[in-house]
Structure formats: structure tokens, C-alpha cells
């Protein structure tokens, strides 16, 4: 039964062998194409039958009609080991060796196709990416043990790259840079020396805008900015800044923001810095409030001097209220204060202090106000104390501004602290402050930062509410500290 099935499969494959061009029988194939009744060479069948045991064959490599050692007929992927036809898929099949009876031949239909600039020029109108020939597979040995399965990760690592030389990529560098494996290949070549850097730069520099926002191309641009020389870097800067708002749009992109930050780190000359800052300036407000763009602004603050960052400081001072009440903006605003000097810092702190009451009640702005209070700038704290006066009770009962009042009790001068405590004591229902979820923290801070008569006044105001302090969940800390701890 087994032999019958194998013979049947072998006979089914006979029509496929009539492709004379592949088997080295060009005349037979031509005759069949013209309808002529030409004899076909069945020597391959004799070899097949010899392997199956039907015909005695003393030597696998020698035959009466000549040397067949160079024949390795293709084998079908799903066929039995006795079949010599091997198909990669339903349409295209490949041979493990070239189909030829001449041992001395050097080229084959199935030899790997050489990459060259001529090939790419011919394919420019079609598909630039020419796939390499599949790897050669040897015939399995029947006596060998089955190999262990290889993990997909190891297979991917062992798979040969289709990119082997930079020369064949001339004119297609931009497309290669947008491919995951091509981008990695180009990054590796950048480490080979100045010649490779110049070659890759010439291929991608004019496409810098598109590559910076590409998921893979942005990594190549980052690496290129790190290794290129000053003249090349200036060329990239000019490409990015010649059109208005182009650099702003790149900075707002999730991939572009990384490339722009790398660009900012690599800038060395005053001219380069001025061009980049001028290109970013129209979009500073949008960049500061954007989850991607704010990192670009912060990188400018970190990498450039105060003089170059002056446009950022000016924008922060003008729009401090809008910026300070935004989750990313409040961080940038604090960074601006930290990086600014002399007049820039004074102007920025004064602008924040003027808007202190609104910022103190905001979920993000309160952090900016606390940061300014901790600087202990006399003019700014005096301005804040003036705005808060008469409103401390109101601010103490709000979630975010209560943190600001606590900071005032810790940092303000003694006279200002006394005004805060007296205003709290003068509240119509002081016991409400004690059991309030936010105001109780303010009262506790007042106990911590008061002494003498003010401290005594606070403890005396709490004594009538001892039972309340014992039972209320918000008063336990106050009771344990004051009450009156002997």
C-alpha cells in the first residue's frame, strides 16, 4: 500500500517536470509548447525508482548516460521523502541547488540575486525592496535524530538581513530609514566611520522633517545628530527651520519630540541655538501645555543659557495664569523659575504673585504658589499675604488652597503668621474648622508653628470642644498634640 501511494504521488508530479527550462531540457519544453510530440528524458525517473528499490542503482552519483551528481530535484513540502519536488508555495518553487548538468557552472536561476545600483534603478518604478532568495535547505538524514524546536526569537536573530551594503541603497535611503530593519541597519553603519556618515547624511538629510516623526526614522535621525559634524548639523537645522511652525509640529508629535530633544542637546553654536529658539517661539504656549511639547521646552531650559531662554521666560511671565493652571504647564513654570536669573526671575515671580489667589485654589496652580512662597522673596510673599488677608478661612476649607495656607504658616514672617491665626480664631464657628476634612490640617499647622500667647490662645479655643476632638476622625491629631498634652 505504501509503495502504491508513493508511485501514485510520483506519477502526479510528472507533468510538473515538463518545464524543460528548469530541468535543463529546453528543447523538450519548446517542442511541447509548439504541440510537437517530442521524447522526454526519463533518466530522473530511473533515479527515483532506484531510490525506491524498483531499479538497482550501484552508484547514486553516476548513471549510464552521464553524471547526475549535480541534480537535486525540488521536493514538495508536503510530499513523502521519496519525492524530489519541493515547493515553497503553490506558485513558486525553489531548488536547493541549481538545475544543471554542468558542475563547472557559476550562476543559476536560483542563485542569490546581487544587489547593485543598476538593479535599484530598474526597479524604481515598481518596488524598491528586492527580496533575497530563500535559504538553501539540505535533505534530511533519515538516521539523524529530530532536532529540537527553535524559538521564534532565535529564528528572528538568525535570519539574514536583506540589507547588506550601503552602495545598493543609493536613492532609496529615505525608504530604508522608514523600515524597522532598514533603520537599524543604517544606525549600525553610522558607527563604521565618517565615510558612512556622509553617505547616509546625503541620503536622508533633505527628508529630516518626515523622518523625525516616523516611528523608526526618528531613531536614525537621533543617531545621525549625535555623530554628524557641525556643517551637517547646521544643514539639518536649516531644513527644520526654513518653514514656519514646522519645528513646533514636530515637537508636538510623540516620535518627533524625542528627535527635537536630541537636536537641542547637540547644538553647539550660537547661530544654531538662535534659529531653533526662534522657530519654537511662536508655539511656546502650546508646547508648554502639551504632553510631548513640554519636554522640548524643558530641554531648552536645561541645555541653553538664560540669555537664549529669554523668549521662554517672557512667554511664561505673560501667560503664567494659563500655564500654571495646567498639569504640564505648572511643571514648566517651576522649571522656568529655577533656570532664570536676576531680572528674568524677578519678573516671573512677580507675575505669579499677582495671580496668587486664583492659582492657590487650582489643582495645579497651588504647587506653583507654594514654590514661590518657599523662595522667600519678600516682595512676592508680601503681595500674596495682602491678597489672602481676610480670606484665610475660605482658603483653609478648600482642598487645594488649604495646602497654600499651611505653607504660609510655615514660611511667612511672624507678623503674617499671627494675622492668619487670629483670623482663624475669629471664625464664627471655630469648631467647624476643627472637624473639617481640610481645615483641620491648617489648624494643626497653626499649632505647630505658633508659640507664646498665640499658641495659648489656640489651645484655649479648643478646650470647650474636647469631647468633639476625641470622637471626630479629623480631630485626633489635634487632640493628641494640643489638648492638651501636659
Image (cartoon, rainbow, N blue to C red):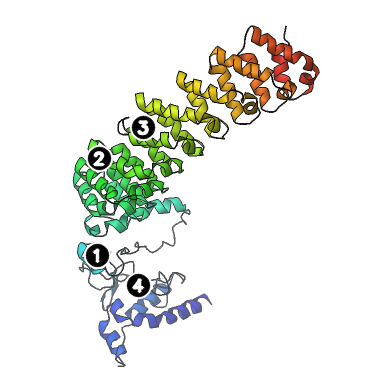
- Describe the element under mark 1 as helix, strand or loop: helix
Q: In 3D space, how far apart are the residues under numbered discs 2 and 1 (Cα atoms)?
A: 37 Å
- Residue labelled with disc 4: 73
Q: Residue at x 45, y 20 (%)?
A: 379
Question: In this image, 19 relative to 331: left or right?
Answer: left
Q: Using a 10 Å C-alpha cutoff, classify the residue at mark 4 as few (fewer than 14 neighbours), some (14 to 19) or many (20 or more).
A: many
Q: In 3D space, how far apart are the residues under numbered discs 4 and 1 (Cα atoms)?
A: 32 Å
Which numbered marker is on residue 339?
none
Q: In 3D space, how far apart are the residues under numbered discs 2 and 3 (Cα atoms)?
A: 16 Å
Pick whichever, 121 or 115, lies toward us. Answer: 121
Q: Using a 10 Å C-alpha cutoff, classify the residue at mark 1 as few (fewer than 14 neighbours), some (14 to 19) or many (20 or more).
A: many
Which numbered marker is on residue 272?
2
Q: Could you tell me which quadrant the N terminus lies in?
A: bottom right
Lower sequence index among marks 4 and 1: 4
Pick whichever, 80 or 344, lies toward us. Answer: 344
Task: Report x, y in % for residue 419.
Answer: 60, 16
Pick whichever, 346 or 182, lies toward us. Answer: 346
**Residue 270 falls in image quadrant:** top left
Task: Report x, y in % for residue 378.
Answer: 46, 18
Amino acid at each position: 500500500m505504501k509503495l502504491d501511494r508513493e508511485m501514485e504521488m510520483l506519477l502526479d508530479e510528472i507533468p510538473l517536470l515538463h518545464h524543460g527550462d528548469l530541468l535543463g531540457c529546453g528543447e523538450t519544453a519548446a517542442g511541447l509548447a509548439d504541440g510537437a510530440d517530442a521524447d522526454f528524458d526519463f533518466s530522473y525517473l530511473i533515479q527515483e525508482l532506484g531510490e525506491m528499490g524498483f531499479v538497482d542503482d550501484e552508484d547514486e552519483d553516476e548513471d549510464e548516460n552521464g553524471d547526475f551528481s549535480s541534480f537535486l530535484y525540488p521536493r514538495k513540502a508536503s510530499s513523502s521523502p521519496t519525492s524530489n519536488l519541493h515547493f515553497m508555495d503553490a506558485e513558486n518553487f525553489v531548488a536547493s541547488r541549481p538545475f544543471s548538468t554542468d558542475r563547472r557552472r557559476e550562476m543559476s536561476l536560483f542563485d542569490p540575486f546581487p544587489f547593485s545600483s543598476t538593479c535599484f534603478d530598474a526597479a524604481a518604478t515598481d518596488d524598491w525592496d528586492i527580496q533575497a532568495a530563500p535559504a538553501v535547505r539540505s535533505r534530511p538524514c533519515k538516521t539523524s535524530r529530530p532536532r529540537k524546536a527553535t524559538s521564534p526569537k532565535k529564528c528572528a536573530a538568525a535570519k539574514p538581513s536583506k540589507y547588506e551594503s550601503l552602495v545598493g541603497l543609493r536613492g532609496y535611503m529615505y525608504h530604508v530609514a522608514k523600515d524597522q530593519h532598514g533603520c537599524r541597519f543604517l544606525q549600525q553603519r553610522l558607527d563604521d566611520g565618517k565615510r558612512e556618515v556622509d553617505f547616509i547624511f546625503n541620503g536622508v538629510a533633505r527628508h529630516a522633517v518626515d523622518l523625525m516623526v516616523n516611528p523608526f526614522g526618528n531613531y536614525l535621525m537621533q543617531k545621525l545628530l549625535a555623530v554628524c559634524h557641525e556643517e551637517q548639523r547646521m544643514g539639518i537645522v536649516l531644513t527644520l527651520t526654513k518653514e514656519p511652525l514646522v519645528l513646533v509640529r514636530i515637537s508636538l508629535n510623540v516620535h518627533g519630540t524625542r528627535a527635537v530633544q536630541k537636536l537641542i542637546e547637540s547644538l553647539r553654536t550660537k547661530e544654531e541655538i538662535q534659529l531653533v529658539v526662534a522657530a519654537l517661539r511662536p508655539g511656546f504656549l502650546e508646547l508648554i501645555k502639551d504632553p510631548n511639547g513640554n519636554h522640548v521646552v524643558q530641554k531648552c531650559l536645561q541645555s541653553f543659557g538664560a540669555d537664549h531662554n529669554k523668549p521662554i521666560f517672557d512667554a511664561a511671565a505673560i501667560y503664567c495664569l494659563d500655564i500654571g493652571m495646567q498639569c504640564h504647564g505648572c511643571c514648566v513654570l517651576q522649571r522656568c523659575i529655577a533656570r532664570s536669573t536676576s531680572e528674568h526671575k524677578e519678573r516671573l515671580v512677580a507675575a505669579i504673585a499677582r495671580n496668587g489667589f486664583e492659582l492657590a485654589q487650582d489643582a495645579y496652580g497651588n504647587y506653583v504658589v507654594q514654590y514661590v512662597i518657599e523662595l522667600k522673596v519678600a516682595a512676592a510673599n508680601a503681595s500674596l499675604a495682602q491678597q489672602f488677608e481676610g480670606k484665610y478661612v475660605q482658603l483653609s476649607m478648600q482642598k487645594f488652597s488649604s495646602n497654600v495656607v499651611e505653607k504660609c504658616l510655615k514660611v511667612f514672617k511672624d507678623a503674617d503668621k499671627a494675622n492668619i491665626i487670629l483670623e482663624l480664631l475669629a471664625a464664627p464657628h471655630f469648631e467647624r474648622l476643627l472637624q473639617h476634612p481640610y481645615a483641620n490640617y491648617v489648624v494643626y499647622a497653626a499649632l505647630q508653628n505658633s508659640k507664646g500667647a498665640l499658641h495659648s490662645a489656640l489651645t484655649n479655643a479648643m478646650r470647650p470642644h474636647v469631647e468633639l476632638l476625641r470622637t471626630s476622625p479629623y480631630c485626633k491629631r489635634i487632640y493628641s498634640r494640643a489638648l492638651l498634652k501636659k
